[in-house]
């Protein structure tokens, strides 16, 4: 879980699409035999709502947007694998 979280933190930068990070994280899950146990999507926005745009685990289209400078995100779903 620490390895996945570290990679998500390193790769989640402005102008990066979450889907590209998800593909890297999936390789890590696969390496450890956990690909079938992971949550697809790993982040959501932080704001006035509990789950704020982008919500990559729930709404798949948000996996394809580019993260923007100043966007506040939570990497809450990287450790929730099992």
Image (spheres, rainbow, N blue to C red):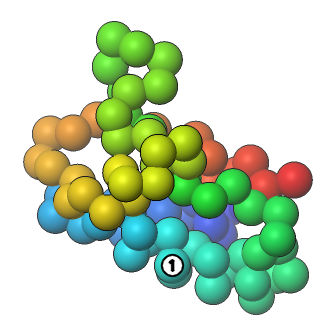
What residue appears at the point 47 percent right and 45 percent down from the top-left corner?
Answer: 59
State which quadrant residue 46 falls in: top left
What residue sits right under mark 1 in the picture? 23
Give coordinates of residue 1: x percent, y percent: 73, 61
State which quadrant residue 33 falls in: bottom right
How crowded pointer 1 is (Cα within 10 Å; few <14, some 14-19, many 20+) is rated as: few
Residue farthest left in this picture: 69
Q: Is residue 34 above or below residue 40?
A: below
Left or right for 64, reference 15? right
What residue appears at the point 51 percent right and 80 percent down from the top-left corner?
Answer: 24
Give coordinates of residue 3: x percent, y percent: 65, 69
- The answer to whether residue 43 shows anywhere in this view is no
Give coordinates of residue 35: x percent, y percent: 77, 75
What residue appears at the point 62 percent right and 77 percent down from the top-left corner?
Answer: 26
Question: How many numbered circles does the render carry?
Answer: 1
What residue appears at the point 48 percent right and 17 percent down from the top-left corner?
Answer: 50
**What SS does tag 1 mark?**
helix
Left or right for 75, reference 33? left
Residue placed most toward the observer, 67 or 5 = 67
- The answer to whether residue 18 shows anywhere in this view is yes
Q: In this view, does 52 lie above or below 66?
A: above
């Amino acid at each position: 879980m620490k390895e996945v979280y570290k990679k998500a933190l390193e790769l989640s930068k402005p102008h990066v699409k979450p889907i590209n990070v998800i593909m890297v994280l999936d390789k890590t899950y696969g390496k450890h035999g956990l690909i079938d146990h992971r949550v697809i999507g790993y982040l959501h926005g932080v704001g006035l709502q509990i789950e704020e745009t982008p919500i990559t685990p729930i709404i798949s289209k948000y996996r394809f947007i580019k993260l923007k400078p100043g966007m506040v995100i939570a990497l809450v779903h990287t450790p929730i694998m099992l």
